[in-house]
Image (tube, rainbow, N blue to C red):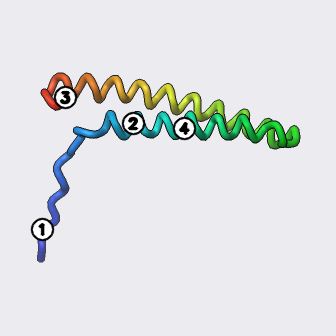
Amino acid sequence: MAHNRPNPDDRSDNVEKLQSMIVHTIENMQEAEASMEFANEEDKKRIEAKNERRRDSLDAFRSEVKDEYRAQQENGLE
């Protein structure tokens, strides 16, 4: 029976991954806002609600970037 060992926790690129997620989320918000020009009222409300959730996600991503960056600094993983 083979022993499955978990991979070591490699957090060295978490900041970059989070920053990429931030960029993609902003792009999605911009595309959604552009599509509102052609949307009916019901779709506009859905888009606005989704973008509000995206704003919340952006806040969380940014907070996590700060935490990860701080952790990298403390552990010398710059």
Cα–Cα gap, marks 4 and 3: 25 Å
Amino acid of disc 3: Glu
Q: Residue drawn at (52%, 40%), measured in percent from left and top?
A: 24
Question: What residue did someone put label 1 on?
Answer: 3
Q: Residue drawn at (34%, 23%), measured in percent from left and top?
A: 66
Mark nearer the viewer, 1 or 2 = 2
Cα–Cα gap, marks 4 and 2: 10 Å
Cα–Cα gap, marks 1 and 3: 33 Å
From the viewer's side, name the closer residue of 20 and 63: 20
Image quarter where the N terminus lies is: bottom left
Question: What residue did someone put label 4 on?
Answer: 25
Q: Is residue 63 left or right of residue 39?
A: left
Mark nearer the viewer, 1 or 4 = 4
Identify the element where label 2 is drawn. helix
Amino acid of disc 1: His
Image quadrant of residue 55?
top right
Question: What residue did someone put label 3 on?
Answer: 78
Mark nearer the viewer, 1 or 3 = 3
Q: Residues within 10 Å of mark 2 (few under 14, many from 20)?
A: some
Amino acid of disc 2: Leu
Question: What residue did someone put label 2 on?
Answer: 18
Q: Position of residue 29 (x, y in %)?
A: 63, 36
Identify the element where label 1 is drawn. loop
> Which numbered disc flags the more N-terminal residue, 1 or 2?
1
Q: Position of residue 47 (x, y in %)?
A: 73, 38
